[in-house]
Image: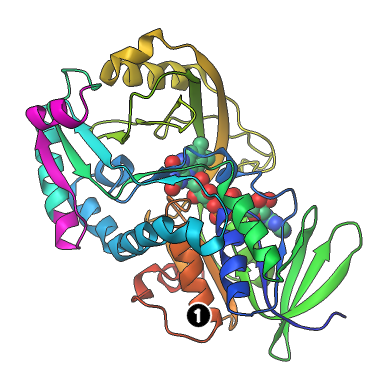
Amino acid sequence: MDAPFDAVVIGGGLLGCATAWMIAREGGRVLLVERDQINQHASGRNAGSLHFQLEYRMIDRGIEAARQAAEAMPLHLEAARLWAALPQLCGEPVEVRQTGGLMIAEDAGQVALLEQKTEIERSWGLDNQLIDRAEIDRIAPYLSDRVIAAAHCPLEGKADARTAAPALARAALRLGAEIRTGCAITGLSRQGGVWQVQLQGDTARTVSASAVVIAAGVWTTQLGQMMGAHLPTIPLALTMTVTMRIPKLVPHLVQHAGGKLSLKQALDGNILIGGGWPARLPLLPDGQPDLDTRPELLASSLAGNAAMAIRVLPELGKVPTLRSWVGTTTITPDQLPLVGPVPGYPGAFVATGGSAFTLGPCFAQVLADLIAGRQASMDLTKFDAARYGRG
Ligand SMILES: Cc1cc2nc3c(=O)[nH]c(=O)nc-3n(C[C@H](O)[C@H](O)[C@H](O)COP(=O)(O)OP(=O)(O)OC[C@H]3O[C@@H](n4cnc5c(N)ncnc54)[C@H](O)[C@@H]3O)c2cc1C
């Protein structure tokens, strides 16, 4: 058996790579294990939006749901700070642009929702202001006249999902982290106060570690089951589309207060369009979602997403799309983040849920703090797995 690691991090998406890097930064001996390749799943397929105001899925069930979702605002604020610092901290050219986000409204009901929402967000310390059409004409003239107001959050923006996790993995390697790809974790057990982690890859073996971190995205529930813990998650298959390059037009992250839409322009000119339109998750014979088979694109989602995008950004009607793709993300049953210790399993930690790309650096910092024996910088009790009981 190998000498113990301080931590084994399971999953080579943005969260796992950021966590391994943060542990290594403090001199921790860390092994990152990814059963496929780094950044192959949700972290490499997402829209790269840095959402710090509450997203549409958090407000579409009414203002009380928004109030509950806003309890995660300290995580949002910390994530905004960390994204801004990330390129310098990790010494890699991570593409991050925090040039502001607009959540747009097309009717009076949506404006009223934005008014209530921004009030809640501001009470948590987020800079988010309702702006009228005159101000939209000034800062976002590219938006259709149908847009009558918007919530403007200057901290929002985008990061390049294709390069962020690999950059953090390289930074972790430089600090001495070990990374095994093409290597699945197949067993997790605790013996004598140490975690025994079974690896299956080219050479099956077991390593021991003081801590294990489940950073496994849609496979979080499965990894929890391996150790006997109840970590409920819900997989959502989603659609993304990217257009051909066009000259600089959209500096903001644009979202909609009344439907599924997010769009932004990448630095190289392509417009990325998403916002939560579903793809079809294949099912296993027992009716459970098949997380290991790529979801299917739905024509209705492509058409619905494109129609909405063109309605608010008419210029897009002239721009050919380049490609569309799918990915599967995780939400939790109450839509709040799941982050912190796994109750009843000393030395085990987990993070997932919702916009884990946006929140990834903050989740990673929280986990690295806990593993180092420090108290997390914010109260996490609302977000740990204890709220789901034992299943
Ligand atoms: C289409 C789409 C658009 C999205 N847009 C946004 C957005 O704009 N902004 C935002 O904040 N979020 C967005 N999300 C959500 C975001 O992508 C995810 O929340 C985030 O990437 C999750 O990162 P992760 O590292 O936790 O998981 P993942 O990136 O899924 O990584 C988990 C890794 O764990 C590995 N793994 C699983 N089981 C094992 C095992 N047994 N052994 C070893 N390795 C294992 C997997 O192979 C995988 O690589 C979007 C998601 C999708 C699908």
Image: 214 above or below 60: below
Number of numbered tags placed on the structure image: 1
How far across and down, in percent of the image, does residue 365 sit?
48, 70
Foreground of the two, 221 or 246: 246
Indicate the quadrant containing the N terminus: top left, top right, bottom left or bottom right: bottom right
Disc 1 marks which residue? 370
Residue at x-position 20% and y-position 23%: 141
| Residue at far bottom of view | 192
Three-letter amino acid code of the residue under disc 1: Leu
Q: Which residues are magenta?
A: 120-141
Q: Secondary structure at mark 1?
A: helix
Tell me which corner region of the image, top left, top right, bottom left or bottom right, holds residue 348: bottom right
Residue at x-position 38% and y-position 53%: 335
Residue at x-position 11% and y-position 53%: 119
Left/right of residue 26 with respect to residue 184 in the rendered view: left
| Magenta run includes residue 17 | no
Tell me which corner region of the image, top left, top right, bottom left or bottom right, holds residue 7: bottom right
